[in-house]
Image (tube, rainbow, N blue to C red):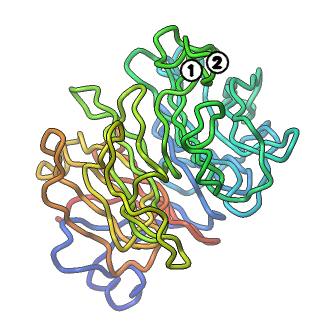
Amino acid sequence: MRILLISLMALILCPGIVHADDDPFTVETVADDFDHPWSLAFLPDGDFLITERGGTLWRVARDGQTRTEIKGVPRVVARGQAGLFDIALDPEFTKNNRVYIAYAGQGKGGFGTEVARARLSLTDAMLVETKILFRAAPKSGSEQHFGGKLLFLPDNTLLLSLGERYDMREAQNKGNHLGAIIRIDRDGNVPDDNPFVKQDYARPEIYSYGHRNVQGLALQPGTGVIFEHEHGPRGGDEVNIIKPGRNYGWPEITYGIDYTGFKITDRTAAPGMEQPLMHWTPSIAPSGMAFYDGDLFPAWRGHLLVGALAGESLRVLAVDGERIGRQDTYLKDLGERIRDVRVGPDGAVYLLTDSSDGRLLRLVPNP
């Protein structure tokens, strides 16, 4: 592990992290040698929490020089796209040391996305007092499309994204959790104002539905508006604004086609179904999402930062109300799948790269 500054020498010695001359930042490798890292959170003391898809949770020192494995992670099913997903700190973490983790858990009929709450004992490097708050139903043997993103709302309720487990028909079925974003409170209870609590045929946790595989959730600073992105099939990756009770259309409407070339539907719009703010065709496989609200990059303030797996880049989207304006692409020459994007308390942008030798990167302005 080391801190690697992009400089003239780096251009010669480290061609793997060379990027375009117009990139307005320097890339630092804070820590490396992670096995498919999935999510990043910031501890109050400046250290990092990093999940690996295989089921390991790390505490990494702020300088990246040391790391400690956090024990007590719930049993994780790690195969295909299944594994340990997102981690989020309780809004009152400084008082209760609670964290929330999303992961694939085993159950009757297969496995599926779950959320657990635990108290993080920093002195013992262990999760204790663990309680499973939510289990998606039904379980499935499919190894694809788990969602797994977490987001706390201003009222301290928690959103969790759930993929349709590669069974597109289920995304329109409110009788299960597949292809939905669900909302629970910090104890796992269903809030009284969830949109479907009074509908007998619907799962009360559902907040929105008709999703394929949501891989990004972010709250717009100052407005409380929820932004989301999700993977399309072959084309049709979307950015949406999430509103309670709304249907986001998959698979009845889509801008993508099946991987085989088969047309899924002739429709890109339909009454009662939401339109995306934008879509990517061909797909970039967006992953990770954050609004920039720091001071180091004033030109990005209020912009949406999106990582790209297939697109191997960082996208910066100018948001104007419910419209996406300019889109800038950075790190095109990095040659890395970007799994997560976060804005740190220091105003730097932090990225996780998705590989068997994944890295924690920090972007800071060019000197």
Q: Residue at x 71, y 52 (%)?
A: 83
Disc 2 marks a residue whose amino acid type is Gly
Residue at the extreme bottom: 12
Foreground: 18 or 321? 321
In the figure, is residue 319 to the left or right of 230? left
Please tell me whether mark 1 sits on a helix, a strand or a loop.
strand
Q: Which residue is mark 2?
A: 188
Residue 303 screen position, x and y as percent:
20, 48
Q: Where 175 falls versus 71 (above or below)? A: above
Q: Residue at x 36, y 55 (%)?
A: 238
Q: Which residue is mark 1?
A: 184
Disc 1 marks a residue whose amino acid type is Ile
Foreground: 318 or 332? 318
Please tell me whether mark 2 sits on a helix, a strand or a loop.
loop
Q: Quadrant where the C terminus lies?
A: bottom left
Residue 266 screen position, x and y as percent:
39, 63
Q: Tell me whether circle 1 and circle 2 mark residues in contact (CB < 8 Å).
A: yes
Foreground: 112 or 31? 112
Tell me if I can see residue 297 in this picture.
yes
Q: Residue at x 85, y 39 (%)?
A: 107
In the figure, is residue 109 to the left or right of 331? right
Q: Residue at x 62, y 41 (%)?
A: 178
Residue 63 screen position, x and y as percent:
48, 53
